[in-house]
């Protein structure tokens, strides 16, 4: 099924954003785990996987419209050093995604591609939920301070008997 080139470009641009977010969240999860913030790392890793599901849906839609999914480009991955910087970096990419998704929905509806608009709306709902989470965490950090906040995301675990790096 031949898709509209402008719609396919919006889908590809959002795909680029999702691929970037996968990397950013995954790296933040690894950094968080390394610092001992295991509860936070689990949540952030799950966010990375959510972004992967978005990328899969976008890829399928682009292919259905006879487009070529662009896996060769990424936006700038923003890496935070502190938990506050990580949340701020993640919020930035989510705010950019929300703007792009809203613009894309308008274009897709104007071009009568309701299915692509529905895909963007579903992703938008997920991104709005994530923005709410990030803003809540940043508010907690502001109220509690970073040290006290971090004490809530540490989880004591037993060492893995097979050792680090084992599969």
Image: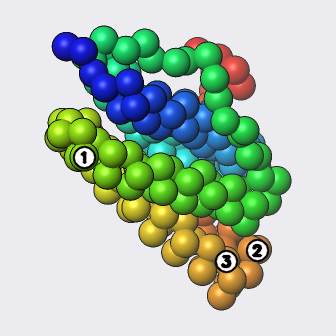
Q: Position of residue 20 (x, y in %)?
A: 60, 35
Q: Nearer the viewer, mark 1 or mark 2?
A: 1
Nearest to N terminus: mark 3 or mark 2? 3
What residue appears at the point 31 percent right and 26 percent down from the top-left corner?
A: 4
Which residue is more in the foreground, 48 or 113? 113
Marks 1 and 2, how far apart at CA: 49 Å
For residue 38, the mark is: none
Mark pair 3, 2: CA separation: 8 Å
Relative to 51, residue 58 above or below: above
Please name whichever residue, 44 or 54, is drawn nearer the observer in this view of the structure.
Answer: 54
Q: Which dot, 3 or 1, sits closer to the camera? A: 1
Residue 162 lies left or right of residue 42; in this view the side is: right
Q: Which residue is mark 2?
A: 147
Relative to residue 154, is residue 95 drawn left or right?
A: left
Residue corresponding to mark 1? 110
| SS at badge 1 | helix
In the rendered structure, which disc, 3 or 1, sits on the residue that comes first in sequence? 1
| Label 1: few (<14), some (14–19) or many (≥20) C-alpha neighbours in 10 Å | few
Looking at the image, tell me whether mark 1 or mark 2 is earlier in sequence order: 1
Residue at (37%, 15%) from the top-left corner?
67
**Mark 2: few/some/many CA within 10 Å (<14, 14-19, 20+):** few
Residue 141 visible in image: yes
Among all residues in the image, which is located at the extreme right?
81
Q: Are marks 1 and 2 in contact (CB under 8 Å)?
A: no
Above or below, 49 against 62 in this view is below
Q: Which residue is mark 3?
A: 141
Above or below residue 75? Residue 39 is below
Q: Calculate the distance from the C-alpha at mark 3 to the C-alpha at mark 1.
A: 42 Å
Q: Quadrant of the N terminus?
A: top left
* Dot 3: element: helix
Residue at 60% from the left image edge and 80% from the top image edge: 139
């Amino acid at each position: 099924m031949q898709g509209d080139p402008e719609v396919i470009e919006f889908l590809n641009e959002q795909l680029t954003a999702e691929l970037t977010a996968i990397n950013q969240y995954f790296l933040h999860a690894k950094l968080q785990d390394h610092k001992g913030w295991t509860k936070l790392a689990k949540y952030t890793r799950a966010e990375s996987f959510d972004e992967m599901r978005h990328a899969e849906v976008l890829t399928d839609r682009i292919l259905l419209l006879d487009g070529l999914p662009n896996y060769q480009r990424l936006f700038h991955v923003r890496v935070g050093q502190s938990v506050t910087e990580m949340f701020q970096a993640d919020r930035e990419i989510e705010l950019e995604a929300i703007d792009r998704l809203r613009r894309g929905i308008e274009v897709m509806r104007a071009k009568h591609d309701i299915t692509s608009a529905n895909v963007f709306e579903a992703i938008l709902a997920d991104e709005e939920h994530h923005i709410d989470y990030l803003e809540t965490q940043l508010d907690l950090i502001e109220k509690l301070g970073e040290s006290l906040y971090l004490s809530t995301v540490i989880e004591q675990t037993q060492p893995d008997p097979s050792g680090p790096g084992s599969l």
